[in-house]
């Protein structure tokens, strides 16, 4: 959709603004098409495949060194800012951490005017059952509405123009230990949302809400009998261990599946051709694996489902009987790659367990896997059974400390989403280099309290640097280039047709690197550490902008966001052990940063002519008044 | 799972069992007049006279100084530690109270006050930003937890010194190896 210049009669200073092109999202465009518009950013992953790739190339590897801060907007909130801003037409939308304010910013006004803020007023007590800071990963746009989740288990639909609440649906109970932090995905008129609470013994689920009314259309649980998990006649698991009935019950001690986790707090992607959604489930509860013998299906798994009915086409468990809190919720990018001379419909998934998987998305079978971080917890994945092979020496025993397990609980990569460039055909992966000491201890299920049972202390992985930003070739399934970072890289990644990659660090750097070589091209020090998802868009003035939220927190930044005691390494489920120095690098503070190339390099001849005309008219009027 | 909490409580902490068993049947107050008469209880009326705020305006009486009636012996602290784990306090506040979902209990910053009565009331009543109310545990159990929570600063300091000492020893060991000396 090209920007249309609209000529309007103008008066005085209003003239310049009126001359800027006005953009709208056409009502009859489907999201599949609309998400391809490089000028806008309608869903957190940019498109249904979550490539986080923008076709904009006004900013490129040659000129990104000149990038400047154009404006900054304080969100008014502390704690970890994980969301991706959205740009719909001429408005930018951002969702804050608790209390989950939705700000709408008018991009036609210099420096961005605050148009309105919508405040859902979530319950303050919800903060007490959120495991990993009171984050929110963003909103999604469809059909003139902004959809997002609140910490206290509501999905909200807000009118994108007016900011009025259209509907608000309650999906869970904080008294059950449930919260919501994930960004919805809207597919064919259904808003797909999942719960958080794998550390609280919740029962994980994905719900589909009608975008018009907010009514629940279907619910797919992660555990329990097939009728709840929506496994039926059309289901075929890719490996033998997935094809017995009611595995969501039979692979657990009696009733343990009811408090078994499998929360759906991560990313949902969609393939419009196969008409399948893909998403993962969290760790099983409790972390003390000895209390739940069995595979614990379908926790730490990936599902492929029909978006209309929710029925599962296939499901694959990344980590049967997970012992390390290696959730399965990371994004599975929908990519078409030529592998061994054949075109393949794949998913690329950087798993918590340290393996980069390339999967056949038609059936869930592994095409290839390779470690993308040091891994000693497993010796590999059995390609016949699809099951990881545990390193028995690293399987924790109750009451004993098992030292130096790699990767740690946050895995080789946690929620922080990677990007894919169709130009280089490479993945751009923000991630961790962490190991841990782990001691399982007995825990009791008390509804509304943590159901964990582990003493954990994390440490830096081999080399001492705790994070990486890695370019990865999914066809060869190997590393291309890699940047070492002092801290885990907990932000999202963005890659553009200008062959520039953007990411942010916990120690307050927003960086641009060359997508081909990994050479750093530009950096900017923000007010607080960055864990947000960078986006890029075209402003009403035709200039390309890059935007990212700064505001440290999340699980990695909990030591700062929670003011935790750095003398105790077990804090924040062990993350404090690996981040005792983070408070020396950053404090809290939420703000949206928007960057652009300097004005003179981007003004089109058209805009320059219009400015000159406006100036001439204004001079003429001034002359008349004298 | 409920029965396992009772089983643990009744076996390991005889004083707690009846209090927890009681909460199955009734939402009880912190203590009855009869319980207040016992030496191990302070009583609801006296506890509730402790303000949460530190602002003391004209005409308001000085808050009572309330000590932990159980004291702070190693035995009481250990009882508190077992409760801290059994009730999943360690899940929110981390083992040794370093903090996580809930704020740290081991440092010197107290959002709602760090006196024995302040800590006791925070556990009894819960607090608005996510701390649950544990009234049903009974006053005695909460005094045990209070003793444990108030010991955490000292424990964290000890842990930090131990870890620094270990790091120093392994450093010294490496230096000795390099210089050819054995220990």
Image: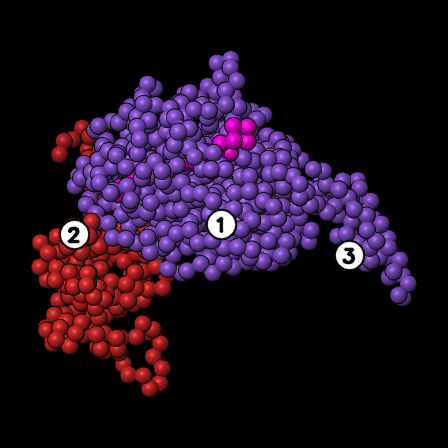
Task: Measuring from the top left, give residue B155's x and y in whole percent.
Answer: 20, 54
Q: Say above or below: A580 vs A626.
A: above
Q: Which residue is identified by label 3?
A: A14
Judged by depth in the image, the label closer to the viewer, 3 or 2, is: 2
Q: As rendered, which of B113 and A528 lies closer to the eye?
A: B113
The one nearer the camera, A166 or B17, is A166
Q: Helix or strand or loop: what does disc 1 sit on?
A: loop
Q: Give the range drawn in magenta.
A: A268-287
The residue pinned by badge 1 equals: A215
Q: Name the residue under label 2.
A: B3
Closer to us: A614 or B26: B26
Residue B78 seen in this snapshot: no
Chain designation of label 1: A
View extreme (bottom): residue: B59
Local packing at callout 3 (Cα closer than 10 Å; few below 14, some 14-19, many 20+) is few
| Rendering coords of residue B69 (x, y %) | 14, 70
Please identify which colour was used for chain B in the image. red
Which circle, 2 or 1, is nearer the viewer? 1
Is the residue at mark 3 from the same chain as the one at mark 2? Answer: no
Mark 3 or 1: the one toward you: 1
Please tell me whether residue A280 belongs to the stretch shown in magenta.
yes
**Chain A image colour:** purple
Mark 2 and mark 3 in contact (Cβ < 8 Å)? no
Left or right: B136 with respect to A91? left
Q: Which chain is mark 2 on?
A: B
């Amino acid at each position: 959709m090209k920007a249309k210049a609209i000529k309007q009669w103008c008066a005085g200073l209003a003239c310049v603004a009126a001359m800027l092109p006005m953009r709208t999202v056409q009502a009859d465009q489907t999201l599949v098409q609309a998400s391809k518009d490089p000028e806008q950013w309608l869903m957190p992953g940019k498109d249904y495949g979550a490539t986080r790739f923008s076709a904009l190339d006004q900013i490129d590897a040659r000129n990104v060194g000149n990038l400047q801060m154009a404006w900054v907007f304080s969100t008014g909130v502390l704690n970890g800012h994980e969301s991706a801003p959205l740009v719909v037409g001429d408005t930018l939308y951002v969702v804050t951490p608790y209390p989950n304010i939705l700000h709408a910013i008018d991009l036609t006004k210099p420096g961005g005017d605050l148009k309105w803020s919508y405040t859902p007023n979530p319950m303050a007590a919800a903060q007490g059952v959120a495991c990993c800071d009171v984050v929110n990963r963003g909103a999604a746009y469809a059909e003139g509405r902004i959809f997002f989740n609140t910490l206290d288990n509501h999905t909200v639909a807000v009118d994108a123009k007016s900011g009025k609440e259209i509907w608000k649906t309650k999906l869970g109970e904080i008294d059950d230990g449930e919260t919501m932090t994930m960004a919805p995905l809207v597919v064919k008129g259904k808003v797909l949302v999942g719960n958080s609470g794998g550390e609280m013994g919740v029962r994980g689920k994905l719900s589909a809400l009608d975008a018009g009314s907010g009514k629940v259309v279907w619910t797919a649980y992660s555990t329990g009998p097939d009728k709840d998990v929506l496994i039926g006649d059309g289901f075929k698991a890719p490996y033998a261990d997935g094809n017995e009935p009611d595995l969501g019950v039979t692979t657990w001690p009696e009733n343990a599946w009811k408090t078994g986790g499998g929360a759906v707090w991560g990313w949902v992607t969609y393939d419009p051709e196969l008409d399948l959604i893909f998403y993962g489930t969290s760790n099983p509860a409790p972390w003390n694996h000895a209390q739940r013998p069995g595979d614990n299906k379908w926790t730490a798994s990936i599902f492929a489902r029909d978006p209309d009915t929710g029925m599962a086409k296939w499901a694959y468990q990344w980590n049967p009987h997970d012992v390390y809190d290696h959730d399965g919720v990371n994004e599975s990018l929908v990519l078409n790659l030529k592998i061994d001379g054949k075109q393949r419909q794949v998913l690329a998934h950087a798993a918590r367990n340290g393996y980069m998987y390339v999967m056949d998305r038609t059936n869930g079978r592994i095409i290839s896997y390779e470690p993308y971080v040091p891994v000693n917890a497993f010796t590999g994945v059995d390609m016949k059974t699809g099951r990881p092979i545990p390193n028995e020496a690293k399987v924790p025993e109750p009451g004993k400390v098992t030292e130096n397990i790699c990767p740690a609980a946050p895995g080789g990569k946690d929620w922080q989403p990677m990007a894919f460039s169709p130009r280089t055909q490479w993945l751009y992966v923000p991630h961790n280099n962490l190991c841990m000491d782990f001691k399982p201890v007995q825990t009791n299920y008390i509804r509304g309290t943590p159901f964990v049972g582990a003493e954990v202390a994390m440490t830096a992985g081999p080399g001492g640097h705790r994070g990486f930003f890695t370019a990865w070739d999914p066809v060869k399934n190997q590393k291309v280039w890699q940047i070492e970072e002092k801290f885990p890289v907990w932000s999202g990644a963005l890659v553009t047709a200008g062959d520039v990659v953007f990411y942010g660090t916990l120690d307050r750097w927003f960086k641009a690197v060359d997508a081909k070589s990994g050479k750093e091209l530009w950096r900017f020090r923000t007010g607080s550490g960055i864990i947000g998802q960078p986006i890029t868009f075209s402003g009403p003035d035709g200039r390309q902008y890059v935007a990212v939220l700064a505001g440290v927190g999340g699980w990695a930044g909990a030591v700062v966001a929670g003011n935790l005691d750095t003398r105790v390494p077990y804090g924040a489920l062990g993350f404090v052990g690996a981040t005792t120095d983070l408070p020396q690098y950053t404090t809290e503070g939420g703000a949206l940063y928007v960057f652009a190339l300097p004005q003179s390099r981007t003004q089109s001849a058209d805009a320059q002519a219009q400015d000159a005309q406006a100036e001439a008219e204004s001079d003429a009027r001034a002359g008349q008044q004298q | 799972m409920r029965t396992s909490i009772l089983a643990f409580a009744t076996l390991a902490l005889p004083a707690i069992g009846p209090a927890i068993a009681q909460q199955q049947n009734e939402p009880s107050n912190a203590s009855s007049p009869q319980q207040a008469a016992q030496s191990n209880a302070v009583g609801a009326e006296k506890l509730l006279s402790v303000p949460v705020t530190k602002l003391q305006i004209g005409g308001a009486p000085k808050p009572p100084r309330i000590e932990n009636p159980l004291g702070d012996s190693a035995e009481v602290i250990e009882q508190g530690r077992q409760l801290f784990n059994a009730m999943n306090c360690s899940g929110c506040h981390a083992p040794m109270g370093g903090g996580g979902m809930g704020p740290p209990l081991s440092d010197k910053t107290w959002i709602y006050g760090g006196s024995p009565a302040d800590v006791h009331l925070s556990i009894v009543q819960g607090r608005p930003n996510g701390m649950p109310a544990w009234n049903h545990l009974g006053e005695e159990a909460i005094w045990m937890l209070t003793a444990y929570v108030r010991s955490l600063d000292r424990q964290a300091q000890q842990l930090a010194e131990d870890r620094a000492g270990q790091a120093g020893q392994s450093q010294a060991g490496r230096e000795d190896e390099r210089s050819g000396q054995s220990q």
